Image (cartoon, grey):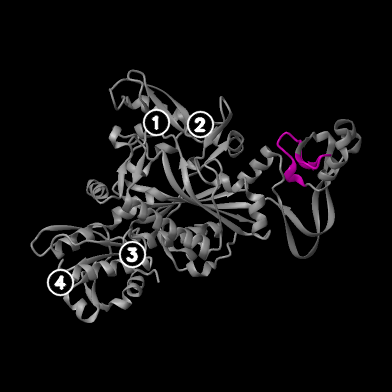
Amino acid sequence: MREKVASLAKRRGFLWPSYELYGGVAGFYDWGPNGAALKRAVVEQWLRLFVIEEGMLELDSSLISPREVFEASGHLAEFSDLLIDCLKCGNSFRADHLAEGLHPNPDSLEAAQLEKIIKEAGVPCPECGGPLGSVRPFNLMFQTHVGPGTGREGFLRPETAQGIFVNFPQLFRLAREHLPFGVAQVGRAFRNEISPRQGVIRLREFNMAEAEVFFHPREREWTGEMGRYEDTELKLVPREGAERTCTLGDALETGLMHNRAVAYFVALTARFLTLVGIDPARLRFRQHLQTEMAHYASDCWDAEVLTSYGWVELVGVADRGDYDLRQHQERAGTDLTVFVQYPEPKELEVERLTPIHRALGPMFKGEAKPVAEALKASDSTAIKPDGSAKVVITDAEGHKKMVKVPKECFKLERVKERMTGERILPHVVEPSFGIDRIVWTVLEHAYTERKAEDGEVMTVLRLPPVVAPITAAVLPLVNKDGIEELAMRIDSELKSEGIRTAFDSGGSIGRRYARMDEAGVPFSVTVDYQSKEDQSVTIRWRDTQDQVRVPITHLAASLRELAGTD
């Protein structure tokens, strides 16, 4: 199957290895004309769901970020795969790949565990058969410098998420300072994979679609109606226990899924994937094991799809908590908390930091007063593991900065206050989509074969009309008696209506149908002698080969209705 789909993808202009003229470079692929159109259509459906239907803000942030961003996010310390080198030929490999078959889940193991398994099994170098060295972490980010010379150290982004987090204050204002709200972003990301394989399943440059949805920490409920998805039946693989099929409502009621926001975006993910052509019978959602969780996540469910590569992760729906905003708040020294107003004032007992002025004065001198005010407005969340507190003050020049206050300069007390609201640091749920993987899987799931009347096996690419690169082929039955000219005029009119078409007048009509079926074109419009007489044409449906006659004046509207794009 994989070889057949790869051959079709190359032949029909969907997907090509990058730089093939120079022998290719592992981990890079180019989307050809049909592939680029298919990928764009998949992204458009994602934006329609997340930006238009769900009402999220859209952002397009920079591809390169300074070092400080990834120091704060944890990517410099944590974003690594485990690498092992051959001591003979010097080639490098992902250690978990070499441990496949030796452990049920090698990518959940730490370096020492992987090294032990590989050594005990006597695994040799896959290239030369030589001995392997030690397992060590390898950071996956591409490093660069901004400006001439050494410049400022920067990195190509390994995900689009950080561009959203560093723009949080502006985005919150645009969201009318109301929670919850979501931000959607589509764009390129880069990961310097150790040994990319599996075609477009693991790339060094790839396309992502991510949403960061900001919630009140105690109110994980998205604005969308959960009721619309409660009866959605999903195949779930919980962290503990066997795979099961149940409705989303049952999953929440039984505690199989405990986070309603995560559950909502799992359901929305399933809707999107099936819309663009993923076979629902080959779709499941698997909860991450604790050992495989990303450094920022407290829970994550992966949308996994069965492909010729086995079960492949296409989407991750993660609860990132307040990790990212808290990290950037501390690293940048900028207060990212937001004020959430209560419906009516409350008399509450709260914990507050009380400044000890005799200690503050000598230590902070002219800044003692703003530090004291900042302490009074802070609670126990400002206290760090070493007992100090971090608060944000405004200095004499009007600039905000974060200040570390030693523990001897304040004490924690419980006080009663009449409160109109509270300052909180929002929590985040993130659905993250690998677009290239999704497009490849759509091609695999759309690939079918059928026998023609003469027994010849014909390829049919059953792409859903909403994402098909070409909506309709315009085919003159013959190239004489004005039929071709009429077909060309119809083709031009459809293009002017915004319908993407292909014009084909070469060979028998049966061969032309077959070419269009293989390219995934859902409809073929045949122009014949009757078309000249009554200004009507035949629309043929790729999947069933059924045909219907429609007036030329209604053709564009009919195609939109059939394609589901009207």
Helix, strand or loop at mark 4 = loop
Question: Viewer-proximal residue, 272 or 305?
Answer: 272
Gap between marks 4 and 3, in whole Å? 32 Å
Which residue appears at 84% of the width and 56% of the height?
417
Gap between marks 4 and 2, in whole Å? 64 Å
Q: Which residue is mark 2?
A: 143
Helix, strand or loop at mark 2 = strand
Residue 95's disc number: 1
Mark positioned earlier in the residue sequence (3 or 1): 1
Queried whether the magenta region covers residue 391, the answer comes back as: yes
Q: Amino acid at mark 2?
A: Gln
Q: Which residues are magenta?
A: 379-401
Q: Which residue is mark 3?
A: 465
Location of residue 542 in the rendering, given as x and y in whole percent from the top left corner: 24, 66
Q: Which residue is mark 4?
A: 481
Gap between marks 1 and 4, in whole Å? 68 Å
